[in-house]
Amino acid sequence: MHRSLRTRRLIRTGAALTGILTVVALAACSPAASNGGDDDKGTIDAKITDTTAAPSGDIDSFTFASYAEPYSLDYAYAFDYADNQVLANVCESLLRLNPDFSLTPSLAESFEHPTPETWVYDIRQGVTFHDGTPLTAADVVASMSRHLDPAVGSSWFSVYQNVVDISQTGDHQVTVTMSGPDSQFNLSMGGSAGVIESAATLAEKGADYGNSTGGVNCTGPFSFTGWESGESITLTRYDDYWDDALKARSGEVRFVFMGDSTARVNALKSGSVDGSWMIPIEAVPQLEASGKGDPLFGASTAVGNLVISDLDGPLGDLRVRKALLLAMDRDGIVQAAARGVGEVTDVFTTEAVWRAASDAARTAAFDDVTHYEQNLEEAKKLIAEAGAEGAELTYVTAPIGNDFAVISQATAAAAQSIGLKVNIESVSPAAYTALFSDPSAREGVDLFYTSWYLSSPDALEMYSVLRTGEFSNYGGWSDPEFDEVVSQAIATDDPAARSELTAKAQQIANAELPWLPISTGPLPLFQGERITGVSPSMAFLYYPWAAEIGAR
């Protein structure tokens, strides 16, 4: 999570979409026995659900629980699950990333790529912001230009790093000029990097834009109504929304912040909350037995990794990184943390984001890599060679879910088994999210966990964020060969040719381990008995999913 759990940070992070592609269901291991409750002897069915039943009608309101309060609703900083699951329903981008991961027109009704260095967007007419003012090309220029302003410090600057000019070139047209070919820029316009806000609102709100007092004024199916700090955010249906196909079925949506996973699950079991994304896997049997709704699994692009956030310490030695990964019982982690739902991986992407790749690229990316099967003797040998016996590491975690607890303890146990020591520090979910946005929060931290998702089915998005100096390269890892390969891939428009370069980047990362890959698995969520219409998909971070929800 940019972004706490993933933190998508592109994510972010450049979101890359290679055309109209469909995310395939992620493979899950055979369901394992669950320990969801003392009397629970059920198993977890991890079958992927693409859509749920259409609503029988509209509904006055519904509530969704979030594991954390958003850091900000300013699209320039919306870089994590908590932020984007709200923002996706209020603010819209030039393009729309759909639940099937196709990329279609949104506030830009069309676009052209007349030269390798230019993207031209024709802005949709007849769209209004929530204050009733019309969307203009000037609003688009102002919104996009913020990512280039050092005073803003956008989390999405990496998407714009090759941009040299953003100009209005017609009454309803905006042209973006790059310093060179950039295959990823347009693919990122379906995410937060492509969000458009009223230029007048940005000027009026200033530093308060996107916070609990300033709010936002966008064009989505819901408008921002209020933010009670530490408690909730309320959205209200925008009756003048431009897209009839996505007019909100609910008059109001309330997001309640519930950092305690047990409290969140109990609220779902009681029916006092209608739904939640990213429910704890271990709670699925309890929620099924409650009769208050349906646990579901959606297609995900996420990979669970341990982020190496300090390469100046013991983990700066590749031998120590390899040793720690070899010492970990990752199969056991999948069983204990996710009830066997998912699978161990040695790379940072899922096959779902390689759909446009050549066969050779897929083979190179997933078969022709090192597979780190648990090997304590080899791990101990590497630690001895590195002279790292007795070295101490600081691991930061948070009470977000059972997986966080299991992975932190498993990492500490693995380290101890090869002569290292891990000191585990637990912080609040909000403080954990800061690890992904605030370098000072990572001072003295060697390791933290992320469920890192991609915002498009192009694996290059993952590796573009690990180049030298990138915002999401949290440990400051640097490899000149890797940087060169990724830069070549970014400049390659052809998806198949680009995929072969991306496969080389995946092989380098697999060998150098700037992060330690653990596992992949589907996206768990809960839809309560009062509501229906949700489309389970990682695209909920950018698609106005709440608009589709109505009465069951």
Image (cartoon, rainbow, N blue to C red):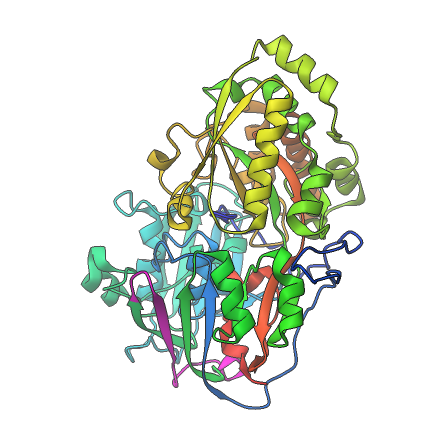
Question: In this view of the protein, can residue 81 be seen by the observer?
Answer: yes
Return the x and y of residue 134 as percentages of the image width and height: 32, 77
Instruction: Describe residue 460's horizontal placement relative to residue 312 as left or right.
Output: right
Establish if 396 lies above or below 337.
Answer: above
Residue 82 included in the magenta stretch of the image:
no
Residue 239 included in the magenta stretch of the image:
yes
Establish if 206 lies above or below 61.
Answer: above
Establish if 319 lies above or below 111.
Answer: above
Q: What residue is rendered at 43% in x and 55% in y?
A: 193
Q: What residue is rendered at 45% in x and 47% in y?
A: 159
Instruction: Describe residue 333's horizontal placement relative to residue 13 as left or right.
Output: right
Start-end of magenta stretch? 228-247
Q: Quadrant of the C terminus?
A: bottom right
Establish if 479 lies above or below 234.
Answer: above
Q: Which of the 4 quarters of the picture holds residue 485?
A: top right
Return the x and y of residue 184 as percentages of the image width and height: 54, 48
Q: What residue is rendered at 55% in x and 29% in y?
A: 483
Instruction: Describe residue 138's horizontal placement relative to residue 511 as left or right.
Output: left
